[in-house]
Image (cartoon, rainbow, N blue to C red):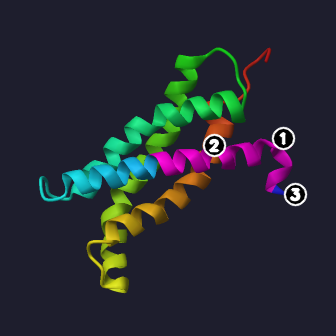
Amino acid sequence: MNLLDHVPPGQLWRFLLVGTWNTIFGYSLYALFTAGLTGRIPYAYIAASLLSSLISITVSFLGYKWFVFKTTGNYVREWVRAVMVYSVGIALGAVLLAPVVFLVTRVTGRPKAAPYIAGALLTCVNGVISFFGHKNISFRPTAGH
């Protein structure tokens, strides 16, 4: 049985399109906050990750709701569930970001670029988690819909 057999036609492509926008938007916020906070607070990239994630959640929620999963009503309930799904990614990022920054620094020898590279790598992991989390938790069909 193929995992994609459970995905309606076009839904994965719409998710990837909206996800690409969300990734560009969210990563741009992350880079902006990292640049703005570096030198002002220790481990600025972690604070930048948390701030950018919180802002981009609502933007991505609306894109997924309107264009990917096409649900109606239930804004608050679905937003809370979306926050729960994203919380997994945020927590994972908070735990893994520092070690991945360390590893990238060791491998590349570029400590200034490492937070940006690590953020991009973890964004890919979060994309997979997000699709299945939103499909099965945030925007799952309710009775009568």
Secondary element type, mark 2: helix
Q: Is residue 95 magenta?
A: no
Q: Number of labelled discs?
A: 3
User: Disc 3 residue type?
Assistant: Met
Helix, strand or loop at disc 1?
A: loop
- Of circles 3 and 2, the one toward us is 2
Q: Which of 112 and 98 is in front in this view?
A: 112
Instruction: Give percent across and percent down for residue 13.
Output: 75, 48
Which residue is disc 1 drawn over? 8
Alpha carbon distance from label 3 to label 2: 27 Å
Residue 134 vs 94, above or below: the answer is above
Q: In this view, does 80 lie to the left or right of 40?
A: right
Left or right relative to 71: residue 109: left
Label 3 crowd (10 A; few <14 / some 14-19 / many >=20): few
Instruction: Specify the principal SS of the magenta part.
Output: helix
Earlier residue among tags 1 and 2:
1
Pointer 2 residue? 18
In the rendering, which numbered label is found on residue 1?
Answer: 3
Please give the range of residues in magenta: 3-25
Mark 2 Cα shell of 10 Å, populated few (<14), some (14-19), many (≥20): many
Q: What residue type is labelled 2?
A: Val
Tell me the kind of residue under disc 1.
Pro
**Residue 52, percent from left and from top:** 37, 44
